[in-house]
Amino acid sequence: MRKMETRKFFNMKMAVVDLTVSSVRVTDLDPELVSRNIGGAAINADILDLYESSSIVLGTGPLTGSFAPASALLAATFLSPREGGLRHVPLLLKAGPEMKFAGIDFLAIRGAAAVPSVLHVKGGMVRILPAPDPVLPIPEFLSQLRRISPVFRESLLAGPAAFGGSPYASASLGSRGSLDKAGLAHRMAMKNLAGILLCGDGGIAFPGDHAERWKKLFERLSLSEFRRKEKGFAGLLGRMEGGSDAAKIPRRAAKRHAACYHCPFPCISHAPIGQRDGQGKRRSGVYLSDPLGWVALWDRWDEEALVLLRRCLDLGLDPASVSGLLPRGGGPETRLRELEVLAMKPAGDDRKEATLAQGRDGEDASLLFGGGIAPLLEGEAWKKRVSQAMVLGLCPVFLLLSPELDVVDLLGFLVGTDDELERMKALLKEAAGVA
């Protein structure tokens, strides 16, 4: 089958960082790698195969940062130190566009730093910089980073729980959490990598018809009966089986909604919590973006769930993992203190390693793709939509929420003729199957 050329949708640049020797090498991306795998998680897996099993690969898709809907994805690929298998964690919001617009399409991270470090990606370059104390709560860590580091617009942080050795650690996009339930935070901490800072200061010259194509697609989605349902995090929960009750608190508490880059459906909400200041405003708030984590907390702790979630995000804890470990007695303060114990108490060295082939062969799809993506569809339908998103560079949650959107609608952003479309469909099926 003739390969499709999608190089015009990338910078065609890859960076390889070796933390052990503090080296950075920026190289041209192999065109054959792009032609064969299209992008995203599929290319990540091939790159990971070139390096030692402890490496992490971050990658964008051809549609990342484009006018295609929800073109937000940055895929993190690694062998999980927790389960031993291959994992692809979707990093959303604006992570993907920020890395691509920083001039780097793929980032391979090898070795381990001698001291806690962060990577700063900007202008086609990657710098290795010293990190603040990585066991600081994430808001404090971010505050110090902003004082001592170059400007960044998005950050991926391991969090204090990962550096404390907690088995319940979860990586976080800034202070907003993520869908990492697969050990990405653990893998980062094992490398003494406290964070990755992204600052897009360029762009990609996408084809001129993309804006008009997006406009027509948006109009079609807006007219859909499905699209008229409730927006925000409560709307996302309402589309999950049995999620309507879990949506009650977000529906009442959320004051504003947000969406990932170029997404027409805002499924993230922000809820103010805590005491009010002298002007009547809440002193803190919490982002609601992890449906499985929220359901686990709400199901067990009801009205306390917002406060407990905020503390989980501060400590870099996965709420789904810790919700059932909190004590029933003693009141809310007791449970908040227990979260700090869970964040800093290692559970022993039960880390596992695996080969890439072992990771590809027999994992449940929900685990393969990070363990945190909502079950909005079932079985093969879920796997197909998510794997396509993880290759193309789109938010998988958006594709699951948009059953009326066909893959042809998305591939139209990449190719023009019917013949090219058929070849691209065949290539996507192959790439998604090996991601």
Image (cartoon, rainbow, N blue to C red):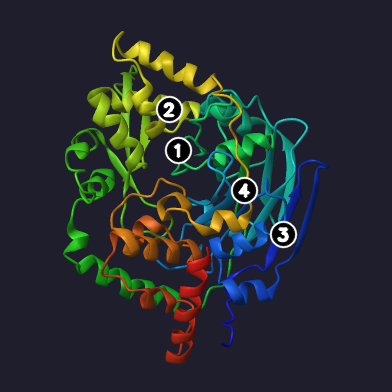
Residue 395: where, in percent of width, then height? 42, 58
- The amino acid type of the residue labelled 4 equals Ala
SS for dot 3: loop
Q: Against 169, is 87 above or below?
A: below
* Quarter containing the N terminus: bottom right
Q: Name the side, left or right, on which 150 lies relative to 142.
A: right
Residue nearer the viewer, 106 or 211: 106
Residue type for callout 3 = Leu
Q: Are marks 2 and 1 in contact (CB under 8 Å)?
A: yes
Residue 7 in sight = no
Circle 1 Cα neighbour tier, 10 Å, few/some/many (<14 / 14–19 / ≥20): many
Q: Secondary structure at mark 4?
A: loop
User: In the rendered structure, which amino acid carries the disc numbered 2?
Assistant: Cys
Q: Label 1, on which residue?
A: 177
**Residue 397 position in % (x across, y down):** 36, 55
Measured in 3D between alpha carbons, the distance from the residue under mark 3 to the one under mark 1, in whole angstroms, is: 30 Å
| Residue pointed to by mark 4 | 354
How far apart are the alpha carbons under marks 2 and 1?
9 Å
Residue contact at pointers 4 and 1, CB within 8 angstroms = no
Disc 4 to disc 1, C-alpha distance: 27 Å
Write down the quadrant of residue 156 in the picture: top right
Q: Is residue 263 visible?
A: yes
For this rendering, which residue is in front, 261 or 346? Answer: 346
In primary-sequence order, the first of circles 2 and 1 is 1
Residue found at x 67% / y 59%: 49
Q: Nearer the viewer, mark 4 or mark 1?
A: 4
- Residue 50, numbered label: 3
Circle 2 is placed at which residue position?
312
Using the numbered discs, state the Cα–Cα distance from disc 3 to disc 2 in whole angstroms. 35 Å
Q: Residue at x 43, y 27 (%)?
A: 312
